[in-house]
Structures are given as structure tokens and as C-alpha cells.
Image (spheres, helix red, strand yellow):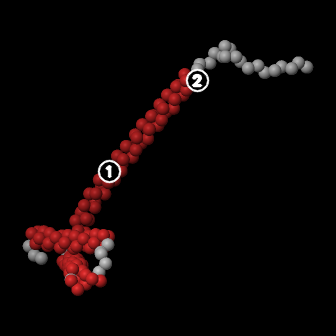
Amino acid sequence: MSSVSPQRPSASDTVASPPQQRVRPRLWVSLSSLVFAFLQSVCTFLMAMAGLRLIIGVGSLVLSSEVAVFLDGLHASWLRIPMISLAFVGAALNLIAILQIRRLRAHPSSRWRQAPVAAGKLRMERWQLTLSIITFALIALEEGFHFRLFHHF
């Protein structure tokens, strides 16, 4: 029996190219495949969007007539007046409560037992005050536009 030992090829025996040159073609093939797959998916997406745009256009045409009827129903006096009244009463009560708290806090007889008010509490009071004022402004705007458009309150 003869023993044949596997021989390793020496560096001079290999005719293969260096590793950097072998990786570049594979990289370009991979990148070009990725680019073509991306372009195909963009094309598919745009074709799907064309159909979706048609559905959205037809849907908006149908809904435009329905929305106008729905908004006219919401703007009816039986719903508008109670909602505005509740908003006005809520904002007024909130404003009265905040002003009462500030008045009591500023009263000389209560200063000796008062701890300094936390910054978060003052910030929350300012938010409530601001929101109450904005509510009054929105009510005034809505009533002004309503009077201008429908000639009655």
C-alpha cells in the first residue's frame, strides 16, 4: 500500500485571482439584483396606487354629497345650541373656580397658612385659564359666523 498524502497547492500553483477581485463581481451582481428588485417593487406599488387613486376619487365623489348632508344635520339648532351652552357653562365655571382660587390665595388672612404653590399646579391653572378663554373665543367666532351665514342665532 502506498500512502498518498494530500498535497496542498502552493501559492505559485494557484491561478485564482486575488480575493478582492473575486468579491467585486459578486457585490455588483448583488447590488444590481437589489436595484432591479427595488425598481420592480416601486413599479408594482405605483400601479397599485393608480387603482387606489381611482377608488379614492370615486369614494370622495360619493362622500362629498353625503358629508354636506351630515354637516347640515350637525349644524341644526337642536344640537348646536345645547353644545354651545354646555361649552359656555363649563368654561365659565372653570374660569370662576380658577379666579376664586387665586383670589383666596392672595387674601392676606390666608397667606400665613399657605405653602408655596407648586410650579406644576400653577402651570395647570394657567392651562385651564387659557383653555377657558380660547373656548369663549371659539364660541364667539362660531356664533358670529352662524349669524353671518344664516342671519339668526
Task: Judge left or right: residue 64 versus residue 37.
Answer: left
User: Could you say whether the residue bearing mark 2 is in a helix, strand or loop?
Assistant: helix
Task: Tell me which residue sits at (68%, 14%) in the image.
Answer: 13
Q: Is residue 66 visible?
A: yes
Residue 139: image location, x then y, percent: 17, 73
Q: Which residue is mark 1?
A: 54
Q: Is residue 35 placed above or below 115 in the rendered structure?
A: above
**Local crowd at mark 1 within 10 Å, few (<14), some, or many (≥20)?**
few
Q: Nearer the viewer, residue 60 or 45?
A: 45
- Residue furthest to the top in view is 12
**Local crowd at mark 2 within 10 Å, few (<14), some, or many (≥20)?**
few
Task: Judge left or right: residue 38 versus residue 136.
Answer: right
Please identify the quadrant where the C terminus is shown.
bottom left
Res. 65 image quadrant: bottom left
Residue 138: image location, x then y, percent: 18, 70
Q: Is residue 125 placed above or below 27 in the rendered structure?
A: below
Mark 1–mark 2 Cα distance, whole angstroms, equals 53 Å
- Residue furthest to the right in view is 1
Q: Mark 1 belongs to which amino acid?
A: Leu
